[in-house]
Each structure stands twice: as C-alpha cells, then as structure tokens.
Amino acid sequence: MTLAIPTPDTPLRIGTRGSPLALAQAHETRARLMAAHDTAEDAFEIVVIKTTGDRVQDRPLKEIGGKGLFTKEIEEAMLSGGIDIAVHSMKDMPVDQPAGLVLDCYLPREDPRDAFVSPHVAGLAELSEGDIVGTSSLRRRAQVLHRYPALRVVEFRGNVQTRLRKLDEGVARCTFLAQAGLNRLGCADVARGPVSTADMLPAVAQGAIGIERRSGDSRIAALLEPIHDTPTAEQLAAERAFLAALDGSCETPIAGLAEVTGGALRLRGEILRPDGSEAHADAIEGPVADGPEMGRALAETLLSRAGRGFFDWRG
C-alpha cells in the first residue's frame, strides 16, 4: 500500500480541545507528523472542538459526568468524519473506547509528577492548620487530606492563568498542576517544583498524550506509526489495566505510575477514600510484557485490603 501523505489540498484534520495546553499538544503532534513525513504545516488542519467539560466551569466534574466530558464531542466528530484524528491528555481518557474508535498511538511521555504551585509557601509542610488548598482533582484532594488532615480543600478549576489569579486573590494558599502541562506550555517556572512521587503518586497516565483514530482506517494508522512511542505504551498498558480493574472514574481517587528500567517494569498504585481518611498503596514488579497482568494483580491486592464497598463511600 502506498502511504497517502496529507497535502494542503487534502489536509489531515486534527481534533482537539481549545485550551492552551490542548492546543500545545495538538501542535506537538502536528510537528512530529511533519518531521516524520517531511510535510509542510499547511498539510494539517487543527480543528478546535469545545467539550462539555470546557463549557461548564462552575461545578465539579463528578457532578456533570466525569472524565468523558472532555472527550465525548471530539469522539463524535471523529465518528461522523469531521476530523481524522484526536489528540488527548491520557489522564482524561476513560478506559473503555467507543465502538469504532481505537487509541494505539502515544507520544513520548513528559514528566508525570504533580507540581506544587503557591505564591506563599514552598510546600504543604509549611501550611498551618485550616489553610486552604485548591484543587479540582479528587485524587489530589484525598492525598492532601490523608497526609495533612488539618488542611482544608476547595474546588479549584480553570486554566493555568485562572488558577494563578485565584491564588493571588486568596481563594487558596496553594494548588497543584501537572508538571507535564507546565513544561509543554513553557511555564515550568510557575511551580515551586515537582512533587516527589513518594509524597504524591500521580494520576494514571499523567504526562502522556494519546492519539485516537477510527478503527479500520489503515491510512491513518500508517501515518501515525512513525510517531508512536513504545516505552510510553508499555507504561500505560500497565497503568490503565490497573485503573480498569478498579473501575476507576472521577469519583474514585486512584493514583498509579509505571516505570520501566531495562526489561523490568515497576508499577505503584494507591487507592483512597475521598476524604483522605483511609488509603492503601503497594507496588509490583515484573517483565514489561506482563504489564497489563501486573496492573490487574495490583488492583486485586489493594481491593482485598480495602474491603467490599471501599469505593461506594461518597462522604
């Protein structure tokens, strides 16, 4: 089969959310495709699609439907033929794919750690009893309250600029952002620094970009193949199997990180109650090829410790 390279007359349409970070990720995808296929920028069209998650900013995600609200409209556009591929932050992606779509291309993973952001203090340990931490992440909320139960946590959504303004206005003393997002935006200096994964294990797939396409579209699959990063795929196979076995959603605080050294993979996982009152964590190691099986095994270990109904509690 002759590879059908996109041209200005038949551009490849790249679907994305319209936030600065989403656009940066779409631009990175375009740049990698341009380099891989020696094509010009106008052979690609970036199509911005506003999602429900972007439109509704005044309520927690769990109240309006969870993570899928950042992907639903984009996936509908792809299924209807309005776009050819979609660029996603993998930590926003549900573990189940809609019929007719496949997610099998990942860009090299950025720093997966959380970043601590505050104009006031250098870290959580410097906060006083009753000080306010702002975050829209149930995982971060639970982790903060588990380690520092005397702190208060408030809902804190918006882009980087919005969250910085809220900090300046005193809505909270500090917040967290993904270090990967700050790096991709050229805003790493916004943070005091990354948080050690020993102190705050990140969200499953944090720092990874995935590219979704229609299943059966061999032309698009061939175009994407040169930019696919196998080490990232190996990490995410373990992490997302862990998440799937836990039936993870926006209402279940779950953290997980896989790291590969040579031919060995180490997966760490943590599950928490939303109020931070209880947490269970462990790790598992084995061959990279066994990543998905290890993810499921680690999930079973943590669930057996937590007991029946651990995730049914909603505090």
Image (cartoon, grey):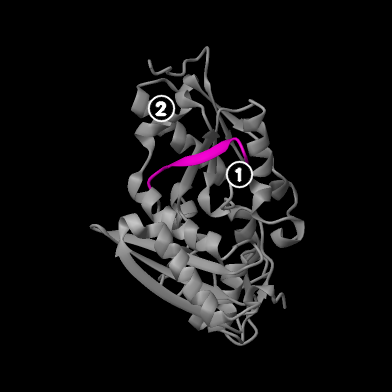
**Residue 10 appears in the figure:** yes
In the rendered image, residue 126 lying in the magenta stretch gets the answer: no
Looking at the image, is 157 positioned above or below residue 170?
above
Check if mark 1's residue and mark 2's residue have beta carbons within 8 Å. no
The residue singled out by tag 1 in the image is 19
User: What's under tag 2, amino acid-wise?
Assistant: Ala
Q: Residue drawn at (39%, 62%), measured in percent from left and top? A: 258
Q: What is the distance, in whole Å, between disc 1 and disc 2 at their CAs?
A: 28 Å
The residues colored magenta run 98-108
SS category of the residue bearing label 2: helix
Quarter location, residue 309 = bottom right
The image quadrant where one finds the C terminus is bottom right
Q: Residue furthest top?
A: 9
Residue 159 at x, y = what percent? 61, 53
The image quadrant where one finds the N terminus is top left
User: What's under tag 1, amino acid-wise?
Assistant: Ser
Looking at the image, is 95 positioned above or below residue 228?
below
Task: Classify residue 204 as left or right of residue 141.
Answer: left
Task: Classify residue 285 as left or right of residue 269.
Answer: left
In terms of depth relative to the viewer, which is nearer, 122 or 253?
Answer: 253
In terms of depth relative to the viewer, which is nearer, 4 or 242?
Answer: 242
Residue 172's disc number:
none
Residue 228 at x, y = what percent? 38, 39
The mark nearer the N terminus, 1 or 2, is 1
Q: Residue drawn at (33%, 55%), measured in percent from left and top? A: 289
The residue singled out by tag 2 in the image is 222
Q: Which is closer to the viewer, label 1 or label 2?
A: 2
Residue 260 at x, y = what percent? 31, 59
Residue 265 at x, y = what percent? 32, 62
**Residue 122 appears in the figure:** no
Task: Classify residue 305 as left or right of residue 229.
Answer: right
